[in-house]
Every structure is written in C-alpha cells, then in structure tokens.
Image: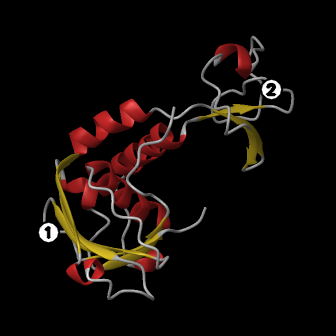
Amino acid sequence: MTMIFDVFTEAARGTTLSGTVQYRDPDNYGFSQGPAFGLQLIMAAWQEGGDFGAGPVSAQTEAEFEELFELYFGPKARVDEEGYLLEDGSTEVRIPRVKAEEVYKGRLDPYGGRGFSDGVHYLSLTPEPGAFARRTEEIIVSWEIEEDKDNMDGIDDEEGGSASFTLEVSDPRYLEHFTKNASFQTAFTGHLPSS
C-alpha cells in the first residue's frame, strides 16, 4: 500500500484532536472534506502502533477498530485449501462441510480474491461502505479541514500540499491512543470503499 499522507497530531484534548496532513507527493490532488477522512486518520494511527507516539487502546476500542477495518476493506472468510469454511479460531473445517463460495454467494470481493495470512487461507468479502458511513456519523461529531494558505499560493512546490484539521468524537475512548503528539503515514484518502 502506497502511503499518500504524512500526518502529525497534537495530544487529544478530551474528545477533540487537531493536527496536519501533508501530501507526500508534490502534486497536490486536494483534501477530502468529509468526516470519513477523520475517522480513517484515527484508525490509521491505531494500526501503525506505538513507535510514532500514539499509545495503546482498550480491548473494547480495539475490537471496534477491527470491525471498522472489516467494514472498510471487507471481512475475510477463513477457508482451507479447497475453499471450505474453517471453525472460528481454528484450522479445522466446519462440520457440516460447506464452501465459502456457497455461504457468501454474491458477497465475495471480485477484486480481493484469495489470500494467505497467519498460516490460513481466506477469501475476501466485499466492503460495506454504507455501514462504514453510518459508523462515521456515530463516531465523528464534527470535522473541519482547511488547506494551508501557502499551498494555495503555489509555494509548496517540492513538498506536497498540507492542511490543518480538527475533529471531535462522540466518546473520548476513540482518541485514547493520542496521549501525546504523534506522527504517522497513511494511504487513507477520505473516500469510501466501493462495494
């Protein structure tokens, strides 16, 4: 995955997070104005881990972030080499044996295909952009992003354009990993996945 943005944030203040987003490519294609970009930045910071300054999250928040990633990228159906569904948390085939293609007919991601991770085969299911958008509305209370004026004057020719953002979430636990200033990179653009 190609990283598109460098992100720098201040420590969260309750339910508010502020920071900047900068294109890594000098060709600035604009910044998404929608609140999905704010949620994606929060998710990306969690995914990157603690080396950049963001801390851990609670088990509840971790489970919710994992669910959000599944909505955005599509869940994975764990299968054996022949495509039979596996028991949850196991490498044993479910009884009765059933193929994932039968159970998830019409939901298999035509672009995601097959994969292999952590010693297990999987089939990718389609993303759920509508569900992701609904969750964004529940989590992001407000989102503001403003392109820096220097960018609009054409001054940042060698560095990509940048923008400042401020977001507010419905519950401070969504920002619990921002205990201090943080920096990370992301390929999220603020766009919703295609279904």
Q: Is residue 49 visible?
A: no
Q: Secondary structure at mark 1?
A: loop
Q: Residues within 10 Å of mark 1 (few under 14, many from 20)?
A: some
Residue identified by numbered label 2 = 83
Towards the viewer: 137 or 11:
137
Would you call the spot at circle 2 few (<14 residues within 10 Å), some (14-19), or many (20 or more)? some
Q: Residue at x 66, y 15 (%)?
A: 103
Residue 58 — which label? Answer: none
| Residue 25 relative to residue 58: left or right | right
Q: Residue at x 26, y 83 (%)?
A: 153
Q: Quadrant of residue 163?
A: bottom left
Q: Position of residue 31 (x, y in %)?
A: 33, 62
Position above or below: 117 against 30: above
Q: Can residue 10 be seen?
A: yes
The span from disc 2 to disc 1 (Cα, nearest Å) is 48 Å
**In this rendering, would 186 be left or right of 90?**
left
Q: Nearer the viewer, residue 37 or 157?
A: 157
Where does residue 130 sit, x and y in percent of width and height?
A: 38, 30
Residue carrying label 1: 13
Q: Position of residue 155 (x, y in %)?
A: 32, 88
Type of amino acid at the residue the image marks with label 1: Arg
Q: How many marks?
A: 2
**Helix or strand or loop: what does disc 2 sit on?**
loop
In the image, what residue type sits under mark 2? Answer: Gly
